[in-house]
Image: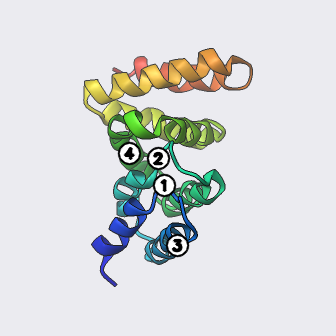
Amino acid sequence: MDVRLELERVFNNRLLRTENEIREYEMALEKLLALNDVSLIGELCKGFDDDTEHHEVMFGLVHGIEYLYQNKAEEGLRLIAISVPKMLSHAKEWVEILHYRILNHPQERKNYAHVLLMLDESARNEIVKLLTDIKEAKSGKFGSYVDEVLKLTITSI
């Protein structure tokens, strides 16, 4: 299997406008996830797009990324974090969804705070702004989770 070709298939079909695009997207994603290679996460993040026609299909990518980093959480979260600045212009909703899911898990919050410390200042600032926006929009459920990540991040800088 040509990994680059399958990654291109995910990217080229990410808008999921037709049955063929959906089929191509799902088949390529299935092949890539079968590799169980966490290092693919950064490239897979390019497969998100807010203009997709079928959000339920794209959720397969969310679940797939979570599957890939389940045994290498810090590495997977680092690859997500590095991808965030490149995703914000065309996939902000999906960036937020990934972050809601990270925030929902206590160990992932700790891992993510550690990952944020390793990022360059520009990327870290973009993610801190994103997390602050999440806190403002969903303070009831996520406010304390965001505070936990930020506290661990800011007190260690």
Mark closer to the chain start, 1 or 3: 1
Residue 15 is marked as: 1
In the figure, 128 relative to 113: above or below?
above
- Mark 2–mark 1 CB contact (< 8 Å): yes
Circle 3 crowding by C-alpha within 10 Å: few under 14, some 14–19, many from 20? few
Tell me what residue is drawn at x 33 percent, y 41 percent. Answer: 82
In the figure, 99 relative to 129: above or below?
below
Give the Cα separation between the discs numbered 3 and 4.
33 Å
Q: At label 2, which amino acid type do we have?
A: Asp
Q: State which mark lies toward you, 2 or 1.
A: 1
Q: State which mark lies toward you, 3 or 2.
A: 3
Q: Is residue 62 left or right of residue 116?
A: right
Q: Which residue is mark 3?
A: 20
Give the Cα separation between the discs numbered 3 and 2.
17 Å
Mark closer to the chain start, 3 or 4: 3
Q: How far across and how far down the image is residue 137, in percent?
A: 64, 19
Q: How far across and how far down the image is residue 59, in percent?
A: 61, 55
**In terms of depth relative to the viewer, which is nearer, 13 or 79?**
13
